[in-house]
Image (cartoon, grey):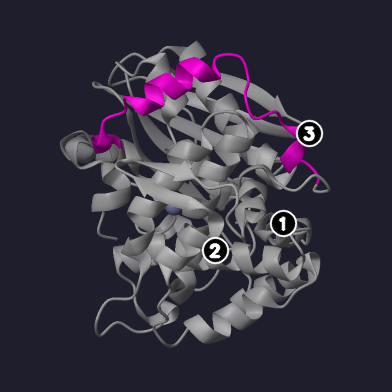
């Protein structure tokens, strides 16, 4: 338990936009493991259901607007709740460290003290940029899966990469159109390259983040196909969480998959893992997009609602009517149109962390 703390920056990270590297290096002394607030830090607490999030703002480098930060934290927490049905841990310590600039910087999540996330945010970050951020949601999703051995790090990152946009869609903070555009563009990065091995033996950036996401995507589709679209990956992941599988616990991966499969009433995760762990497995992504009714159209996509798996696509986005939590959150909330407009004009550089990071 708590094993992430000894190697910050290696395990459990979201991403590090390349442009922020100099800032980040200058912040390194502040990032040494020390979860305790300093005297001049600003502290706030929000309750999410029965879970408590203690937020500390370290503004020693640059000022941060506390209301903007707290709205950002609330939105990320709401997204995670929309997917999992509840916040994953009873108590999270969230440390936000300011830098002089704009945007959200790197995040790291540990299982220490019930859950600790450290993430950086620029003093010039606009409300729209905070609303667009994916990194904090990604980090919070890490809380909802047990810690597994290093060779399985791909599943920890894969779940966060795959679930994050879906969680944000369900909470009204992202759009299906944008998610599928990103998946069509980025999912091929997870395919095995010439000479690469199985998931447990190929620790490249592409296979860890997008290969892990690809595993989740294929599992989600298979669970929905096998259950006549009554269950999805979320049912498996909620089952793992309900069995106590949080970041604070060290589990064997096989145990997590077995419990997940039982919760969804399938054997998809166990079988897929047996197939993928030791050997490279190709996925026919163009056939997947076609089946789901997702057609690339320049930088965006078009949906074909008469495609054979169009209903599965919609259930992946919004959850099936019978599922708890997922469908209970309206897809659009006040202000989402504004957010969507901001999303449409978002520079690609915001995704640098996902596309450029090498570990
Ligand atoms: Zn991560």
Q: Is disc 3 placed on a helix, strand or loop?
A: loop
**Residue 7 at least partly seen:** no
Gap in Å between the C-alphas at discs 2 and 3? 29 Å
**Marks 3 and 1, how far apart in space?**
16 Å
**57 vs 36, nearest the viewer:** 57
| 245 horizontally vs 323: left or right | left
- Residue that label 3 marks: 50
Write the residue at 44% across / 87% down.
278
Q: Earlier in the sequence, mark 3 or mark 1?
A: 3
Give the residues in magenta.
Answer: 324-350
Residue of label 2: 216
1 shown above or below 352: below
Q: Indicate which label's residue lies in the foreground, 1 or 2.
A: 2
Q: Quadrant of the N terminus?
A: bottom right
Q: CA distance from mark 1 to mark 2?
A: 16 Å
Q: Look at the image and say whether residue 334 sits in the magenta stretch.
A: yes
Q: Residue at x 20, y 42 (%)?
A: 18
Do callouts 2 and 3 mark residues in contact (Cβ within 8 Å)? no
135 lies above or below 63? below
Q: Secondary structure at mark 2?
A: helix
Q: Position of residue 140 (x, y in %)?
A: 55, 43
Q: Nearer the viewer, mark 2 or mark 3?
A: 2
Residue 276's place in the image compared with 296, above or below, is: below
For label 1, the residue is: 241
Residue 142 inside the magenta-drawn segment: no
């Amino acid at each position: 338990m708590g094993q992430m703390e000894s190697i910050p920056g290696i395990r459990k990270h979201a991403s590090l936009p390349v442009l922020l590297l100099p800032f980040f290096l200058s912040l390194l002394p502040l990032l040494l493991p020390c979860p305790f607030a300093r005297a001049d830090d600003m502290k706030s607490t929000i309750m999410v259901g029965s879970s408590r999030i203690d937020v500390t703002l370290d503004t020693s480098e640059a000022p941060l607007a506390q209301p903007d930060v707290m709205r950002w934290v609330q939105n990320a927490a709401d997204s995670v709740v929309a997917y999992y049905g509840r916040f994953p841990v009873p108590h999270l310590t969230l440390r936000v460290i300011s830098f002089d600039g704009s945007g959200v910087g790197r995040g790291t999540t540990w299982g220490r003290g019930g859950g600790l996330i450290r993430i950086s945010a620029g003093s010039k970050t606009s409300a729209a940029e905070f609303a667009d951020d994916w990194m904090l949601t990604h980090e919070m999703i890490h809380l909802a899966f047990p810690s597994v051995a290093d060779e399985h790090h791909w599943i920890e990152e894969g779940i966060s990469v795959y679930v994050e946009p879906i969680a944000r869609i369900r909470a009204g903070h992202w759009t299906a159109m944008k998610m599928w555009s990103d998946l069509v563009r980025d999912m091929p990065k997870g395919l095995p390259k010439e000479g690469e091995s199985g998931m447990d033996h190929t620790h490249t950036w592409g296979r860890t983040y997008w290969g892990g996401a690809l595993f989740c995507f294929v599992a989600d589709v298979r669970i929905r196909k096998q259950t006549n679209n009554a269950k999805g990956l979320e049912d498996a992941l909620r089952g793992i969480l309900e069995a106590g599988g949080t970041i604070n616990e060290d589990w064997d991966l096989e145990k997590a998959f077995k419990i997940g499969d039982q919760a969804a009433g399938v054997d998809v995760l166990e079988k897929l893992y047996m197939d993928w762990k030791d050997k490279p497995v190709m996925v026919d992504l163009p056939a997947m997009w076609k089946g789901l009714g997702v057609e690339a159209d320049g930088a965006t996509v078009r949906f074909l609602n008469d495609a054979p798996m169009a209903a599965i696509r919609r259930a992946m986005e919004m959850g099936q009517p019978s599922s708890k939590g997922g469908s209970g959150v309206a897809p659009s909330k006040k202000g989402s149109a504004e957010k969507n407009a901001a999303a449409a004009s978002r520079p690609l550089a915001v995704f640098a962390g996902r596309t450029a990071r090498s570990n």
